[in-house]
Image (spheres, rainbow, N blue to C red):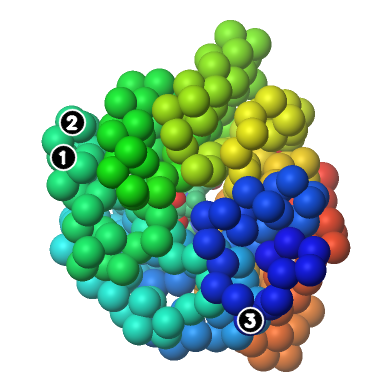
């Protein structure tokens, strides 16, 4: 939503670009079913993500790796049934885009079967050809840099990425390459706030952050984390908005308002 745009009008990929240009924060949240998608949409969310985090939040798996195309399409269809005004973003599962042919076939499935309006895929410059072919074919793409949970076994855990100077430079170069390849947005997960601010300045496409500080074009969190119902430990970058709300609807609205008013994230949620 950018200044002057009717709140009732559906959010599109073009809306996100206009919001970046206008300096209007983009509020994003995951949802995995019809009821929460409807509630989240009524709270005024700009983007709803059917994330592969559903492997953990919905299925109780230890990582996102077991999530299948069938799983994510099932949840995307449940969310799409709410006919949200929000832009519907859907994650490409682990190993669903490791070849360009797979990326094209599976990206098309998320749109045709899952009703995705934009797909998100983890990876850096090695994904540029897939991004270019997908966007060239009319599939909007959000690239996902920084902490890539599908690489947890390669990374050795869920850790902040880009702390060393050479890793930071590589991330900036990846962001540029993906934007040049046609990516419509970039998501940065678990990166130092200063690095995220630099990527946000240096690329033309909207940058959405999670654990990436306050100076990105938008914020995203996981639904269960903002409701305080994630079993076990929640990431440092999340905040339980139920702590100050009486209802689930109120908590989701408080999150949207905190993002719009630049009150979330604060330093305690950032690296
Ligand atoms: N409930 C939930 N919330 C998420 O944000 C989330 C998921 N699930 N599943 C998929 C990924 C995994 N994510 C995670 C999981 C753990 C940390 C974590 O524990 N991070 C440490 C930072 C460690 C460091 O300082 O390097 C933290 O204390 O927050 C981060 C991201 C983000 N995503
Ligand atoms: C945490 C967000 C960015 C995500 O990719 C997911 O929910 O799967
Ligand atoms: Mg994901």
Element marked by disc 3: loop
Which mark is nearer the camera, 3 or 1?
A: 3
Q: Is residue 66 visible?
A: no
Q: Residue at x 19, y 49 (%)?
A: 106
- Give the residue pinned by disc 1: 102
Mark found first going from the N terminus, 3 or 1 = 3
- Callout 3 environment at 10 Å: few (<14), some (14 to 19), or many (20+)? few
- Give the residue pinned by disc 2: 99
> In the drawing, what numbered circle is on residue 1?
none
Mark found first going from the N terminus, 3 or 2 = 3
Q: In the displayed structure, does residue 227 sit left or right of residue 192?
A: left
Q: Is residue 139 above or below residue 205?
A: below
- Give the residue pinned by disc 3: 8
Labelled pair 1, 2 in contact (Cβ < 8 Å): yes
The x, y position of residue 271, in whole percent, is: 71, 36
- Callout 2 environment at 10 Å: few (<14), some (14 to 19), or many (20+)? some
Q: Residue furthest bottom?
A: 246
Q: Is residue 47 above or below residue 183?
A: below
In the picture, which quadrant includes the N terminus? Answer: bottom right
Element marked by disc 1: helix
Element marked by disc 2: loop
């Amino acid at each position: 939503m950018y200044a002057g745009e009717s709140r009732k009008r559906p959010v599109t990929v073009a809306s996100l670009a206009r919001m970046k240009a206008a300096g209007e924060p983009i509020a994003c949240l995951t949802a995995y079913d019809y009821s929460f998608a409807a509630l989240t949409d009524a709270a005024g969310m700009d983007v709803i993500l059917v994330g592969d985090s559903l492997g953990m939040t919905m299925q109780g798996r230890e990582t996102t790796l077991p999530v299948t195309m069938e799983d994510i399409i099932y949840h995307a269809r449940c969310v799409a049934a709410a006919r949200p005004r929000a832009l519907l973003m859907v994650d490409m599962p682990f190993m669903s885009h490791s070849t360009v042919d797979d990326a094209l076939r599976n990206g098309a499935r998320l749109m045709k079967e899952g009703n995705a309006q934009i797909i998100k895929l983890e990876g850096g410059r090695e994904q540029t050809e897939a991004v270019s072919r997908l966007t060239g074919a009319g599939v909007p793409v959000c690239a996902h840099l920084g902490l890539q949970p599908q690489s947890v076994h390669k990374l050795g855990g869920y850790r902040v990425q880009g702390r060393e100077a050479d890793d930071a430079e590589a991330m900036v170069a990846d962001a540029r390459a993906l934007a040049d390849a046609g990516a419509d947005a970039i998501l940065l997960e678990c990166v130092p706030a200063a690095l995220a601010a630099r990527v946000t300045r240096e690329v033309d496409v909207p940058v959405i952050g999670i654990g990436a500080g306050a100076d990105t074009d938008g914020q995203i969190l996981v639904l269960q984390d903002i409701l305080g119902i994630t079993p076990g430990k929640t990431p440092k970058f999340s905040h339980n908005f139920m702590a100050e709300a009486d209802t689930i609807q109120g908590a989701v609205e408080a999150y949207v308002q905190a993002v719009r008013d630049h009150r979330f994230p604060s330093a305690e949620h950032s690296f």
